[in-house]
């Protein structure tokens, strides 16, 4: 059966020693802090969605230590991220936890319920992670994340070994697991992760399996408390001094080991130390508690929680926020982000240690973090967790580090040449790696030795640059003859090549031993092609004050060096030159990079990024420029740049826009992001893509523009889409494709043969010069072809379509449309519904289509076709051709010599002025010839027609029959087909068709009134 993680050797709560609580962590008012000299005020907590609604929120002092959490909460709450709390159970029905509790993820082998009245630890941990923002109690760091309890500390240790290890393997079902527990750091063999058959070795295999499969292979994120054995007299009597390396699982690469600080940011007296630490966090004391007498305080909340148990869930909550911001992060990405974004805390960099700090701050052998090595402390790891900086880095990380953790590589080296450990002397054994193969993330150092009195010795690792990492300092009790695997987290960013030395210092007389060997197992990332990332945080000025050489950064030339300044809160200015780059913040110069930098990402300030004007034309390098939040000004180079403004009202110019740029060289991608942006590129630059994003943007130039959400003004691109919003789009002098997208848009084609698409909304489309195509599509649109021979389609609703100059083709399509051809010989087709068609000037062709249409030919010789229903046709001036179609139509020839043809319906025809020809087809038509002499032509089955104004005295006005008519000639007409019926003459052809001449006497007719042809 596995051994349960040990508590303190006295009657202390698991990982919550006696020097925690209101009296000692700052909640009591004016007392001294045991973790630092002097006094310190409790930080004021910022606010989540509605901080005033959570009554304990103002007392949650830990929020004031972890960066600008309020800005993070504006975007993220941990929603969608699952956190497994491996502890002593969780009170799922707690009023401040139930809203986020996910019972569906509970394990089948162990339950989630606390066993007894003393099991309140997991409930308190849970409130720090994800207490609900619900107007009750306090609020969690990731108040939107889901929680699931796993009773690991009680139930798991009653299982068989196989079942117990399965419980650890089940961490894969969660995105994050919180482990606020640990073993006494006594270097007991069963807790050594380097022993595969011992308990910790088996646990290591289970945890590595969970990480390998969790989150779809990206890895479950495991946080763990460093432990609370520092400065513990009872533990020291056993040779245990709080070295985190002595608790084997703390050394595991896959685990984030967390130290604890008090309210002033200084390490607490109890927090374990060592180079296994990754990060520190405040030991949050105000949190949820088991309800009633089962908890610590007798109520539903406690103000006395603490220990590294309370610091670890702060980190778990921040990780949940990071994963919501970027769910594609690999588990190694999360660790590297936490290390790179951590803030200085406790004693200032460059000063002596104080309080309970084990050593002063130092820096490792990396070269590109704040101008040099990454700062590290054996008490804090890389520093205080900074939620703001970590989330901002998480957002951009995959773009900066596209290789992520799937490129994790390993390398091993060892020596087994035994060396005697001389009494009161220094003994060393070295391993040399001839080349650099990786950037280190983690190093396992396995030391095999025996000595008759272990506490005489100090074991340390000397890095290739001469830095000393203390692994174990005069610890233990009695003789020792084992090996132990130390996990070193403090070497991130360093390369692996060089000579690594294991040093053993014997400081006490009489005893001796043997250093049998050392094994180094490196894990990290391939160095690649020399591309490096230079990272800056708000701690730069403090670091550079102690080490001025950080202001000048030397890098070998490479294809894509990055400047990562997303964690900088001020207004950043970055200038990129052909041979160098500079960075300043808030008007103060920070650093110079002495080689060309090709990619930049800045933070929340109003930033300026530009390729230097003098160097713009000297380099053909591509740039990747990311502005982040804030109102940024970004100017690219003359080549293929990728620019993103991010949130805020940004101004972006591609370098081709400046003097010397050309469309042929440009191949840029420019993205405004949210906010009201101004983006300018070379007009009609082939390969230049502009996307405005959210906000009311002004976008100019390029080849392809997408406006995004918001009311955008777009010009100068060959292909432009307004997307959502009320957009205004102007084309170029070339042939453009413009698409308004959703909502009411104004599109102007300008010169060139353009294609304009209104899409959704009441759009106004202006073709401009040359031969354009316009599609209104949905909603009530206004289409203006203007000059040129245009093709216009109104779309589905009530459109107004104006052809303008040129010979245009207009389609109303669906809806009640108005079509005006304008000047030129136009074709107008009404389509569905009742339309009004105006040919206006020119020889036009009008077709009503379906619906009750009105067709007006206007000036010129027009052709009008009525369509399928009762239409009105108005020829206007000119010699027109009018076809009534199949409905009951009313036809007005107007001026000119018109040809009017009735259709299948019962039509009413007014030929009006001119020498008109009226052709009667089927249907019973009423015909008015109007002024001048008209010709009435009848053939086939023409129905029962009436001519209302036939002039028998006008020898030029005639009724004409085709030669195949049943009426063969005038004699046959008068003898067999014509008769007087009252005041009218009725002519019947004998086949069911008739012609009535109103007000005409039979005697007034003569042969000149008729014709056969």
Image (cartoon, rainbow, N blue to C red):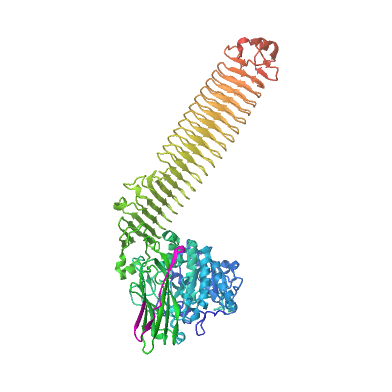
Locate residue 75, reporting x and y percent.
Answer: 48, 61
Residue 81 shows in this picture: no
Please indicate, yes or no, whether residue 393 appears anywhere in the rendered image. Answer: yes
Residue 97 lies, in percent from the top left, at 56, 69
Q: Which of 325 and 552 lies nearest the eye of the viewer?
A: 552
Residue 642: x percent and y percent?
Answer: 40, 53
- Residue 378 in which image quadrant: bottom left
As drawn, is 244 to the left or to the right of 462? right
Kindly identify the residue that appears in the image at 51 percent across and 46 percent down.
743
Indicate the quadrant containing the N terminus: top left, top right, bottom left or bottom right: bottom right
Magenta highlight range: 405-429
Q: Is residue 524 above or below residue 885?
A: below
Figure quadrant of residue 752:
top left
Q: Which one is nearer the viewer's eye here, 695 or 965?
A: 965
Q: What is the magenta segment's predominant secondary structure?
A: strand
Instruction: Specify the quadrant of the image occupied by residue 337.
Output: bottom left
Please check the rendered image and state whether residue 461 is part of the magenta-colored stretch, yes or no: no
**Which residue lies most toward the front here?**
417
Image mark count: 0
Q: Nearer the viewer, residue 305 or 459?
A: 459
Magenta residue check for 421: yes
Position of residue 171 relative to residue 876, above or below, is below
Quadrant of the frame with the C terminus: top right
Residue 486 percent location from the top left of the image: 43, 76
Q: Is residue 579 left or right of residue 51?
A: left
On the picture, is 104 further left or further right than 976?
left
Horizontal side, residue 898 vs residue 368: left or right: right
């Amino acid at each position: 059966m596995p051994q349960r993680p040990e508590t303190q050797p006295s009657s202390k709560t698991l990982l919550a020693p006696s020097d925690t609580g209101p009296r000692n962590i700052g909640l009591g008012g004016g007392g001294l802090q045991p973790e630092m000299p002097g006094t310190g005020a409790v930080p004021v907590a910022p606010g989540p969605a509605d901080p005033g609604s959570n009554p304990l929120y103002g007392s949650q002092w830990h929020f004031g230590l972890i960066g600008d959490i309020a800005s993070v909460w504006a975007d993220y709450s941990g929603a969608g991220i699952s956190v497994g709390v491996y502890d002593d159970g969780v009170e799922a029905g707690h009023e401040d936890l139930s809203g986020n509790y996910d019972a569906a993820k509970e394990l089948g082998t162990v339950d989630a319920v606390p066993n007894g009245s003393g099991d309140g630890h997991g409930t308190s941990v849970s409130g720090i992670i994800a207490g609900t923002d619900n107007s009750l109690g306090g609020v969690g760091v990731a108040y939107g994340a889901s929680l699931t309890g796993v009773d690991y500390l009680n139930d798991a240790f009653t299982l068989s070994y196989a079942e117990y290890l399965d419980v650890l393997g089940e961490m894969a079902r969660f995105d994050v697991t919180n482990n606020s527990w640990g073993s006494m750091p006594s270097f007991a063999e069963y807790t050594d992760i380097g022993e595969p058959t011992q308990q910790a070795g088996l646990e290591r295999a289970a945890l590595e399996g969970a990480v390998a499969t969790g989150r779809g292979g990206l890895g479950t994120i495991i946080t763990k408390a460093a432990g609370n054995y520092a400065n513990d007299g009872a533990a020291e009597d056993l040779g245990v001094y709080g070295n985190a390396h002595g608790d084997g699982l703390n050394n595991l690469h896959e685990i984030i080991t967390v130290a604890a600080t008090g309210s002033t940011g200084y390490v607490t007296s109890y927090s374990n130390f060592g180079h296994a630490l990754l990060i520190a966090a405040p030991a949050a004391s105000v949190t949820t508690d088991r309800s009633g007498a089962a908890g610590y305080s007798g109520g539903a909340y406690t103000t006395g929680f603490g220990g590294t148990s309370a610091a670890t869930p702060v980190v778990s909550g921040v990780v949940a926020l990071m994963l919501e911001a970027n769910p594609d992060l690999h588990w190694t990405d999360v660790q590297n982000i936490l290390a790179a974004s951590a803030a200085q805390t406790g004693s200032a960099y460059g000063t002596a240690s104080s309080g309970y700090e084990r050593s002063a701050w130092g820096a490792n052998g990396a070269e590109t973090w704040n101008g040099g090595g990454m700062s590290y402390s054996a008490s804090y790891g890389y520093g205080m967790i900074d939620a703001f900086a970590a989330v901002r880095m998480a957002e951009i990380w995959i773009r900066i580090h596209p290789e992520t953790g799937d490129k994790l590589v390993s390398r091993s080296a060892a020596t087994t040449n035994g060396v005697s450990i001389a009494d009161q002397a220094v003994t060393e054994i070295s391993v040399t790696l001839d080349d650099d193969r990786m950037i280190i993330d983690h190093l396992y150092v396995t030391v095999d030795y025996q000595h008759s009195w272990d506490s005489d010795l100090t074991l340390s690792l000397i890095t290739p640059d001469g830095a000393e990492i203390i692994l174990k300092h005069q610890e233990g009790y009695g003789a020792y003859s084992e090996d132990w695997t130390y996990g070193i987290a403090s070497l991130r960013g360093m390369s692996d090549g060089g000579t690594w030395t294991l040093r053993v210092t014997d400081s006490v007389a009489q005893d001796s031993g043997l250093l049998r060997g050392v094994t180094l197992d490196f894990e990290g990332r391939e160095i690649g092609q020399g591309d490096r990332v230079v990272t800056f945080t708000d701690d730069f000025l403090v670091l550079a004050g102690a080490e001025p050489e950080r202001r000048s950064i030397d890098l070998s030339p490479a294809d894509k060096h990055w400047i990562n300044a997303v964690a900088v809160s001020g207004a950043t200015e970055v200038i990129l030159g052909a041979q160098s780059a500079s960075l300043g913040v808030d008007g103060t110069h920070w650093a110079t990079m002495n080689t060309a930098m090709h990619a930049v990402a800045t933070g929340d300030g109003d930033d300026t990024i530009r390729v230097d004007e003098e160097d713009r034309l000297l380099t053909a390098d591509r740039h990747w420029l990311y502005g982040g939040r804030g109102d940024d000004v970004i100017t690219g180079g003359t080549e293929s740049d990728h620019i993103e403004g991010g949130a805020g009202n940004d101004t972006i110019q591609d370098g081709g826009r400046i003097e010397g740029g050309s469309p042929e060289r440009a191949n840029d991608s420019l993205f405004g992001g949210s906010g009201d942006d101004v983006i300018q590129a070379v007009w009609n630059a082939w390969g230049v893509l502009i996307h405005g994003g959210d906000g009311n943007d002004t976008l100019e130039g390029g080849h392809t523009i997408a406006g995004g959400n918001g009311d955008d003004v777009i010009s100068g691109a060959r292909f432009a889409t307004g997307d959502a919003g009320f957009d205004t789009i102007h084309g170029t002098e070339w042939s453009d494709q413009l698409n308004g997208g959703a909502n009411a848009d104004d599109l102007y084609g300008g010169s060139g043969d353009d294609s304009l698409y209104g899409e959704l909304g009441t759009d106004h489309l202006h073709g401009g010069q040359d031969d354009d195509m316009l599609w209104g599509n949905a909603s009530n649109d206004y289409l203006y072809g203007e000059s040129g021979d245009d093709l216009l389609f109104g779309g589905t609703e009530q459109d107004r379509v104006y052809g303008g100059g040129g010979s245009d083709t207009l389609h109303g399509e669906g809806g009640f449309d108005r079509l005006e051809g304008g000047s030129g010989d136009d074709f107008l087709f009404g389509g569905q519904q009742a339309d009004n068609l105006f040919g206006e000037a020119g020889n036009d062709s009008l077709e009503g289509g379906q619906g009750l249409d009105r067709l007006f030919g206007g000036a010129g010789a027009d052709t009008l076709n009525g369509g399928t229903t009762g239409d009105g046709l108005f020829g206007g001036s000119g010699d027109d051709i009018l076809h009534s179609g199949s409905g009951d139509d009313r036809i007005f020839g107007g001026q000119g010599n018109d040809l009017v043809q009735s259709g299948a319906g019962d039509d009413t025809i007014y030929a009006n002025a001119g020498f008109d020809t009226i052709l009667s087809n089927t249907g019973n038509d009423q015909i008015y010839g109007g002024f001048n002499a008209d010709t009435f032509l009848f053939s086939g089955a023409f129905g029962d027609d009436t001519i209302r104004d036939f002039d028998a005295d006008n020898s030029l006005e005639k009724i004409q029959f085709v030669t195949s008519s049943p009426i063969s000639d005038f004699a046959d007409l008068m003898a067999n087909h014509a008769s007087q019926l009252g005041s009218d003459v009725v002519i019947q052809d004998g086949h069911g068709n008739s012609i009535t001449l109103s007000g005409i006497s039979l005697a007034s007719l003569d042969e000149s009134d008729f014709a056969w042809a």
